[in-house]
Image (spheres, rainbow, N blue to C red):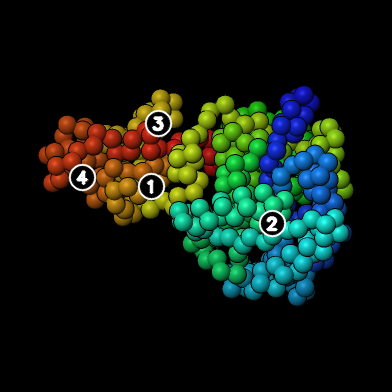
Amino acid sequence: MKDIRQRILKNAKRIVIKIGSNVLAAESGSLNRSRVSHLAEQIYILSTQYKKQIILVSSGAIASGMGKLGIRSRPQTLPDIQALAAVGQTLLIEAYRNEFNKHHVEIAQLLVTQEDFQNPNRYLNITNTFSALLNKKIIPIVNENDTVATHEITFGDNDRLCTLVSHTVYTDLVIILSNIDGFLDMEKAGSVIPLVEKIDKNVLFKITDSQSSFGAGGMKSKILAIQQLVNSQKPVILANGNKMHVLQELFEGKELGTLFLPSETFMKRKKRWIAYFAKPHGEIHVDEGAKTALIKKNSSLLAIGIRNVTGEFNKGMVVRVLCDREEVARGLVNYSSADILKIKGLKSREFSQVLENNIIYEEVIHKDNLAVIQNQPP
């Protein structure tokens, strides 16, 4: 396993590092500036000695605001969260700038919402901005724009944001720094599992749904994000960001945290966009036979396996495909929701009997426009 780790670390040229709120927050809830200093020094070493391009996805704005205003528990209402983020984001980026400037490293702040990744023009702008910054050896520091986010477009936690950024910049490796030592096996006294070759039901069974005290995420959120990353052939390391020299020691060869190996199945760029970026506009509910055909046979979605439709959508929109409330896939539909309700359960040769238009597609979603999402956490 050590050889696998070292090969991945050596070959990774572009790395996304995600830093959780509990790594950056002191016990009082305020920003831990000493921790920011140590992280900046380690990232500087990775950038100079190891010649890595680093993109930093950093939580901490809300926690910084909580500390500044003396608030001990995270608020539940969106306006209060937005207010804390507005106060805390200035403190967070100021701390990063001060510490990186000690090493003569320039940083840039990018505040984004999920809508920025779903809109094609905004997505292109984000991609171009990342490329320009990295070419100039400037470290992008990305956070959710909590001050303008709404319940409809909020990430909920930066684990999701980390996956979107990683797909956007075509990263070679993702390192998630949390306040735990790695992925823990609670059946074995909480010992760290050093290597996860595949995220299957045995791995999902070990998930706890507890959230961190200063952030919005938890282990379930992290594993879901990691699953999306490895399914896109991106290796992931989950390690303890509270350990003093964790990044440096990883690249020195110490086996810290958990390494999640990338899936052997390659997902094309178009399907990655469908699976992780595009906004779903409705849901198609299918039977077990259709689910099996999609996952195991790489089939298109046919009307005969459709039970029901929820929501209203038009031809060409992205929808979620569900089986017994479990998401199976996402795809671009060939028919509107109204037409699918007419043809559900039918064979393609029967479509002309219930559809008024002359254009008939055999598939409701063609396999080239369908991204299978396997083994999602319950």
Tell me which residue sits at (44%, 44%) in the image: 274
Tell me the SS state at disc 3: helix
Residue marked by disc 3: 294
Residue behind mark 2: 141
Kindly report which numbered mark, 4 or 1, lies closer to the viewer in this rendering. Answer: 1
Name the residue beneath numbered marker 1.
Answer: 319
The answer to whether 56 appears left or right of 318 in the picture is: right
Q: Is residue 130 above or below residue 77?
A: above
Residue drawn at (13%, 46%) of the image: 356
Where residue 325 sits: x, y (%)?
43, 44
Q: Earlier in the sequence, mark 1 or mark 2?
A: 2
Q: For this rendering, which residue is in front, 11 or 5?
A: 11
Asked whether the beta carbons under mark 4 and mark 1 sit within 8 Å of each other, the answer is no
> Which amino acid lies under the numbered mark 4 shown in the image of this protein?
Lys
Task: Judge whether 86 appears above or below 326 on screen.
Answer: below
Using residue 371 as the reference point, say whether residue 305 is left or right of it.
left
Amino acid beneath label 3: Leu
Quote the CA–CA distance across marks 3 and 1. Answer: 15 Å
The kind of residue tagged 2 is Ile
For mark 3, does the 10 Å Cα neighbourhood hold few (<14), some (14 to 19), or many (20 or more) residues? many
The span from disc 2 to disc 4 (Cα, nearest Å) is 49 Å
In the rendered structure, which amino acid carries the disc numbered 1? Val
- Which element carries disc 1, helix, strand or loop? strand
Q: How crowded is mark 1: few (under 14 residues within 10 Å), some or many (20 or more)?
A: many
| Residue that badge 4 annotates | 342
Q: Residue 29 in the image: x percent, y percent?
A: 79, 65
- At a point 48% along the width and 35% down the height, the residue shown is 268
Against 132, residue 363 (above or below) is above
- What distance separates the C-alpha of mark 4 from that of mark 1? 17 Å
